[in-house]
Image (cartoon, rainbow, N blue to C red):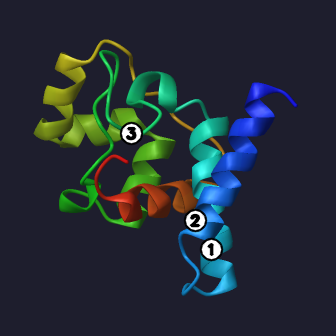
């Protein structure tokens, strides 16, 4: 099994085992959010555990500044968000890798945003 397949399988298992009390649909959405994080290559800039790297900021404690809809919109068009938000402009100045926009379906961006917001601090 390839390393990527192992990582995707692990993401699915972690997403499902940690939420036994959650309804099946919610567990599926959580697992899908983590799979999207991996498949959209977020980790090279934001870290495997969302701790941040020299290229991108940490994706922890996001609920202080974001809601699902706003974060999903930011994923679609980060440039628009930066133009309106001084905090994002400051982050852009600190990290060299530009945040790409994701043209994936809104439902996928919402799933990733919900997963990120639910994660809290880095694992």
Q: Is residue 95 left or right of residue 106?
A: left
Q: Residue furthest top?
A: 96
In the image, 98 versus 58, the foreground residue is: 58
Q: Residue 4: percent from the left, percent from the top?
A: 74, 30
Report helix, strand or loop for mark 2: helix
- As drawn, the label of residue 50 is 3
Q: Quadrant of the N terminus?
A: top right
Q: CA distance from mark 2 to mark 1?
A: 5 Å
Q: CA distance from mark 2 to mark 3?
A: 15 Å
Q: Which residue is mark 2?
A: 30
| Cβ atoms under marks 2 and 3 closer than 8 Å | no
Q: Residue at x 60, y 58 (%)?
A: 14
Mark 3 residue crowding within 10 angstroms, few (<14) / some (14–19) / many (20+):
many
Q: Position of residue 97 (x, y in %)?
A: 38, 15
Q: Say which label, 1 or 3, has the lower sequence index.
A: 1
Q: Please report contact status of discs 2 and 1: CB closer than 8 Å, yes or no.
A: yes
Check contact, mark 1 vs mark 3: CB within 8 A: no
The residue singled out by tag 1 in the image is: 27
Question: Which mark, residue 104?
Answer: none
Residue 79 position by quadrant: top left
Name the one closer to the observer, 19 or 46.
19
Q: Residue at x 24, y 54 (%)?
A: 61
């Amino acid at each position: 099994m390839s390393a990527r397949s192992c990582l995707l399988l692990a993401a699915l298992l972690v997403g499902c085992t940690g939420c036994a009390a959650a309804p099946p649909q919610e567990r599926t959405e959580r697992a899908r959010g983590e799979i999207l994080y991996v498949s959209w290559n977020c980790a090279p800039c934001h870290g495997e555990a969302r701790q941040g790297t020299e290229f991108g900021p940490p994706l922890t404690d996001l609920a202080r500044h974001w809601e699902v809809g706003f974060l999903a919109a930011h994923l679609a068009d980060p440039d628009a968000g930066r133009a309106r938000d001084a905090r994002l402009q400051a982050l852009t100045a600190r990290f060299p890798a530009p945040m790409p926009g994701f043209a994936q379906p809104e439902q996928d961006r919402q799933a990733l945003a919900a997963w990120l917001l639910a994660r809290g601090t880095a694992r």
